[in-house]
Amino acid sequence: MGGVTRAAERLHVSQPAITAAIQNLEDELGLLLLSRGGRTLVPTLDGEAFLARCDGILTEVEGLTADFQARSQRRSTLSVGVPPMVAFFLFPKIFAEFTGSCPEVHIRLTEAGSDTARDMVRAGQLDLAIIAVGETPPAALAAHPLMRMSMMYCTGYGTPMAGREKAELREIAMAPLILFTSGYYHQTLLQTRFRDAGLTPNVLFYSNQLLTIKSFVRQNLAGAFLLPQVIEPGENIIALPVDPPLPLNIAVVWRRDVFLTREIRQFIHFMRTRFE
């Protein structure tokens, strides 16, 4: 076990303090824990049993501390889902402003379609999501509306539609079209609109890559339904209003039935204040 001198050096206390602490512990327990023979201290049988119990307690305390420190670190991470178009034009501003005001919170971003992100929030895989929604909040979720906008039909300058003031769904259905893959709210909306109009769109292919879609549009190879906010100056892409319009709401959503951590509450408060 080593002597009092080594223990005092290791604990950075005086030798008399170590001796007094041992004596007080023995008095409190009514047991002799150490056999004092010569210059060494040797545990008695009671001392060995006491030491074994202490080792277990210290291990448990260390594990408890590590566990709750890990919990604290997890709580300081906020998982947020956003679809590609929202990630492109809106989320960078939100990210910069929120992390500027709450630097202790780390945001883990997951890019997914609105419907997919919605389901991930429901399943507890995401804390929140900023997604496109309909007129009512998705089931089992709370929502705060941020903005309302309309999908536009985007085409290149070299297509027959380029000179139009608006694009009708019947004309759009006859031209090559790129649609987002399943899991996107506006994709579901478009499928419903085409079906209700008795139209079958001429889909060239499906993609969830915004840059790929814009590249095909820019080169006059296909049209696409995009938010006008993702079209940048000089991209040679025209955004036409759709007839009839394709409105959608952008909202932040979270689960109703769970305890909201401090970080989630901070983010919701920030979004409500930012978009009031």
Image (cartoon, rainbow, N blue to C red):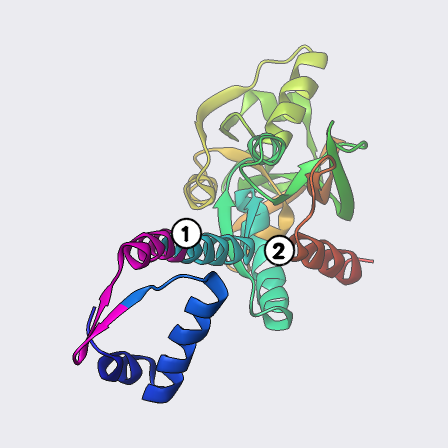
Tell me if mark 2 has few (under 14), some (14-19) or many (20+) residues whose alpha carbon lies within 10 angstroms of its own: some
Q: On the rendered structure, is 125 left or right of 66? A: right
Q: State the CA–CA distance, disc 1 to disc 2.
A: 46 Å
Residue 60: give its label: 1
Q: Nearer the viewer, mark 1 or mark 2?
A: 1
Q: Residue placed farthest to the top in the image? A: 198
Tell me if mark 1 has few (under 14), some (14-19) or many (20+) residues whose alpha carbon lies within 10 angstroms of its own: few
Give, as a three-letter code, the residue at label 2. Answer: Leu
175 vs 82: above or below: above
Give the residue drawn at x 63%, y 68%: 97
Q: Secondary structure at mark 2?
A: loop
**Residue 168: x percent and y percent?**
70, 28
- The part of the image, by quadrant, that contains residue 99 is bottom right
50 vs 206: above or below: below
Q: Is residue 79 visible?
A: yes
**Residue 262: x percent and y percent?**
67, 57
The image quadrant where one finds the C terminus is: bottom right
Span highlighted in magenta in the image? 35-58
Which of 112/33 is in front?
A: 33
Q: Secondary structure at mark 1?
A: helix
